[in-house]
Amino acid sequence: MQSQPTTQTSSHRQAARTARSLPKLASNAFANQIDLMGAPMPFGRNVEIYGENEPAEYVYKVISGTVRTYKVLNDGRRQIGAFYLPGDIFGLEVGDEHSFSAEAIVESKILVVKRSALVSLAARDNEVARQLWTMTAGELQRAQSHIMLLIKTAQERVAGFLLEMAQRSAAASEVDLPMSRQDIADYLGLTIETVSRTLTQLENSAAIAVPTSRRIVLRNRAALSRLNA
Amino acid sequence: MQSQPTTQTSSHRQAARTARSLPKLASNAFANQIDLMGAPMPFGRNVEIYGENEPAEYVYKVISGTVRTYKVLNDGRRQIGAFYLPGDIFGLEVGDEHSFSAEAIVESKILVVKRSALVSLAARDNEVARQLWTMTAGELQRAQSHIMLLIKTAQERVAGFLLEMAQRSAAASEVDLPMSRQDIADYLGLTIETVSRTLTQLENSAAIAVPTSRRIVLRNRAALSRLNA
DNA sequence: CGACCATTTGATATGGATCAAGCGATGTGG
DNA sequence: CCACATCGCTTGATCCATATCAAATGGTCG
């Protein structure tokens, strides 16, 4: 069975007061738009940002830190849906409720934007409407890749996870993992022990190096990709 | 390892000629819209409707029959992404390529609609734009549920699958399965043998009855739901 | 230094995969 | 119309990847 994260819930929900402009080189109009609409808020380690089934009043963008979204089954098994790194937007729903819970993994700064503002903007601006659709489609793609991960062997899952993280982190061949082994395990549908053992295997086969437990060097990317099926 | 489906590819791709009106009681404006725009086409058993990475020129709606979408890993493992029953829309992409392949499972009638028509309509009509977004969000939700299925035990997966199918088929407590055990296995990330054994277990525990291999009677829905975690 | 928490490592158990055979339904050709 | 091949499914025997249980190690912070 999986983890039982220690979560000290913190209700922010009075957020997103005043507009605040953050000069930022975002890659598309939408991301810029968002930057202009939101209020940046700090969240501590393991603090809840929103809970599953809560009204989806806000949309969020990671400024710094890392966020996990997850669901917990009634017997305590936890599945992490995604990790969000700086620049990523999360919590966007079409319906009125969040389908996952979200927590900061480490001390994080999160831009908080009223969903209603975006939606009403989309009603007037086709471009924004298309961006919202595109965002949801991006989430769909990630969910589909996640499905493909979950049918693979432990080695393949871990290799796939490392490659994914490497791709997303700017620094291509070295990954700094903000999340614990438990988080990785709950993302990959494995146990913490299997994740740990698999990392040591990959290290022994010279595919990676693990200077510290939170830092992974991709030493043989070809080998990892081969495992990635 | 999973299946190697026998697929006789059939390139329709000259489809969607003339508009044709099908009087239909669809639940929302979008579905109606689609009905007016498309051309119904027949697809035989195991015939490909489109392939992964092909240009996503069309959007599809099942009139009759059943469709599976899937990906195949380079070593032959197949993962079924979804089953589509009459009334369901599939193949809608925001990007320009299909991310899965699609095949008819049985003799099927499929409405074929030009994607460009929908997209340009959406540019003019906010309501249509929102429907497209909503559709993609629906797919996302299903993908997320699928992820939750894949971390469960074999019994839980099979029970979950049966409940899902029952919910979608009009007839609540009896399910007619258009797909083979192999299809079910590849959807659930199990082997055909495990699916079969699990069904017998569920039958022995009086949760279901299996009068014929393609017909399942939900005899004790509470027991199945309990398994559904 | 000592307590605590995250991670690794070891020993064993087990759920589901794999390998193999049997069975029933469907269809085909003689 | 029957014999037989084929196909989809089930059942049985065994194996193995990963889970589980348990303990040791290491890093961090008071």
Image (cartoon, coloured by chain):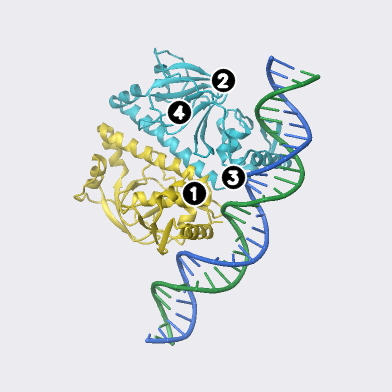
Chain colours: A cyan, B yellow, C green, D blue
Task: Estimate the x, y position of residue A189 in percent, counting from the top left.
Answer: 56, 42
Give the amino acid at mark 1.
Glu
> Residue at image x 56%, y 20%?
A107
Label 4, residues with CA under 10 Å away: few <14, some 14-19, many ≥20: many
Q: Which mark is residue A187?
A: none
Tag 2–tag 3 contact (CB < 8 Å):
no
Name the N-terminal-most of marks 3 and 4: 4
Q: Which residue is pictured at 42% across the width and 62% down the height? A: B210
Task: Calculate the distance from the C-alpha at mark 3 to the C-alpha at mark 1.
Answer: 27 Å
Residue bearing the label numbered 3: A228
What residue does disc 4 label? A51
Q: Position of residue C14 (x, y in %)?
A: 62, 52
Q: CA distance from mark 2 to mark 3?
A: 32 Å
The numbered mark 1 sits on a residue in which chain?
A: B
| Mark with earlier residue (2, 4) | 4
State which chain disc 4 sits on: A
Q: Rounded to the nearest whole Å, what is the CA distance between mark 1 and mark 2?
A: 37 Å
Q: Nearer the viewer, mark 3 or mark 1?
A: 1
In front: label 2 or label 3: 2
Q: Position of residue B56 (x, y in %)?
A: 38, 45
Tag shown at residue A107 = 2
Image quadrant containing the N terminus of chain A: top right
Q: Residues within 10 Å of mark 2 (few under 14, many from 20)?
A: some
User: Compared with residue A221, is residue C22 higher up or lower down, i.e. above or below?
Assistant: below
The kind of residue tagged 2 is: Glu
Residue type, mark 4 in image: Gly
Pointers 2 and 4 in contact (C-beta within 8 Å): no
Q: At numbered mark 3, what does the secondary structure look like: helix, strand or loop? A: loop
Relative to A111, A178 lies left or right: right
Q: Are marks 1 and 4 in contact (CB under 8 Å)?
A: no
